[in-house]
Image: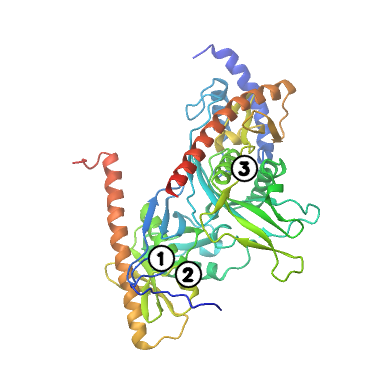
Amino acid sequence: MNDPKPQQQSQQQQQQQQTQKQQQQSRVGVLLFSATSISPDESVFIRSGVEQDVRNDGRGRLDHRDFDVELAPLPQSNGSARLRLGRTQVLVGVNAELEEPDSERPGRGKVVCVVKSAPSLAGKGSRKRDVALSGALQQIIADSDAIDTEALCVIPGKQCWVIYVDVVVVDSDGNVLDAIVLAAKAALGNTLIPSLRVIDSEEGDGKKEIELSEDPFDAQPLDCSRLPVAVSLTKIGSCVVVDATSQEEQCAAACLTFAIDADGNVCSTSKTGPGAVSPSGVIEMLKYAGQIAQQLHKKISAAVDSDSSERDDRM
Amino acid sequence: MGSKQEFISLEGLRVDGRRPREIRKIKFELGVLPRADGSCILEQGMTKVMVAVYGPGEVRGRADHGSKNAVILVNYSSAAFSGNERKKKLRYDKQQAEVCQAVKATFEGVILTRLYPQSQIEIFIEVLQTDGNAVCTCLNGATLALVDAGIPMQDYLIACNAGYIDGTALVDTNAQEDLAGGPRVPVAVLARSQKICHLQLDHKLSRELFDEVLKTAMEGCTQIFNVLDTQIKEHARRQLESASVVSST
């Protein structure tokens, strides 16, 4: 296509870096699900493609795959969503349980996120992966205070709502963390918490009791307006791609994940992988992430809003 | 306890509005996991399971090398959000042992394992939501996933259960009816020959009642088979049409 010489030179450099990276590949992100590892030649092919803005599936570097979300596939849970991003598929179930609050935070409820791989993806390293993803999801959704935990308090010091966000990674083809965060946002968006009243105990000893509403449709949605979406940018060679497939993740030197809310604010960041990114590189990645986050927010909110208006019509 | 729950109303309807011999609504989707050789998501009422099949492929365990027939491996797990209460700890599950045992033993006889010596077929079952009768739904899901994978079997293996509450035999019990106690007979049959491949009973039952309950369960299997067969053939026809093997007229 272009002048072959400059390409050859950069290829030589790349092949030198190649052998170094091969050794470090197993450390590039514990978040990898590599069913089959790729060969060095495939790695070079992917890298050159990325440089020319043509990835293996024809996308440009900053093109995100289209995603498909199904809301409330699990009617027995308080909220649920099934999301497909290319061949990556995740299923999220949200359940609200009444429990005792933490002793250090008696006036607040909790949000607990747990990620598990489906048995077909389980294998060596799957426990580490699950723990890493659970931690990442917990940081993005719960620790960022995106959900008002004070509103989840029922009886201070005694009872609070605990929102359990359980994720099952059904299938993986890269960018699992972003898919999980999107699916969790959709599931929390269609979660309904049963209404309850706190009344004085009948025994008149000053204790309080909880009365759950008898009407199964008497329930409140959660305020998810501050929930962010995650955009992961993967550095391959000297270029940056968005929404990497699992093959591309195996060629990556580093990956930066930005959690960005609907107003464009960065809620949290994390970097995995041994490769280094220059500060100007980070600023540039953040710019791309902001644009993509906007598109993702729009699509997810549209899906959640249309589902909740359908649900209101039905009731 | 408070007032006794009525399981059969005066009009003869069950707690979910079904008749005693009516099975729950069935919905399934094949090929949900493009990387698996076969997969399906099956819903029977509110019980929803996802089954993936990988195989026939190379045998992994050293102990199974050199076997004359294909080895069937079964993996089972149920999601934390599957039950009524969110499951906190992944403790040893009685249901896990039951399902793995049932699926492995039954399918070893149904899959034509002699066609694949020194290979393994792995079946992964994930229970997404349970509302009673998970074992039978898992067996049916495994049949569908194996059909999707194109693995040859003697016949469809269809499972259904029947219980006996308030003097009536009820087919395809849900969780509420399961909690009522009483005998429960899950049975799995080969659809066309009606041969029984799996049968269980954990309760005392007189011989006459056993005949009635078993017959009810097997009729349930026939009903389920009719639904699955029609939809699978429709699915196959659509696939052949899209591959232009069959014309769409």
Chain on which label 2 sits: B
> Which label number is shown at residue A223?
3
Tags 1 and 3 on a common chain: no
Q: Residue at x 58, y 13 (%)?
A: A5
Disc 1 residue crowd, few under 14, some 14–19, many 20+, Cα 10 Å? few
Residue bearing mark 2: B176
Secondary structure found at label 2: helix
Question: Whole-Å distance between the Cαs marked 1 and 3?
Answer: 33 Å
2 and 1 marks in contact (CB < 8 Å): yes
Residue bearing mark 1: B16
Q: Where is residue B79 in the image (x, y as percent from the top left)?
A: 56, 57
Residue A20 in view: no
Look at label 2 and name its amino acid.
Gln
Look at label 3 and name its amino acid.
Asp
Chain on which label 1 sits: B
Look at label 1 and name its amino acid.
Asp
**Res A201 quadrant in image:** bottom right
Q: In the image, is B142 to the left or to the right of A155?
A: left
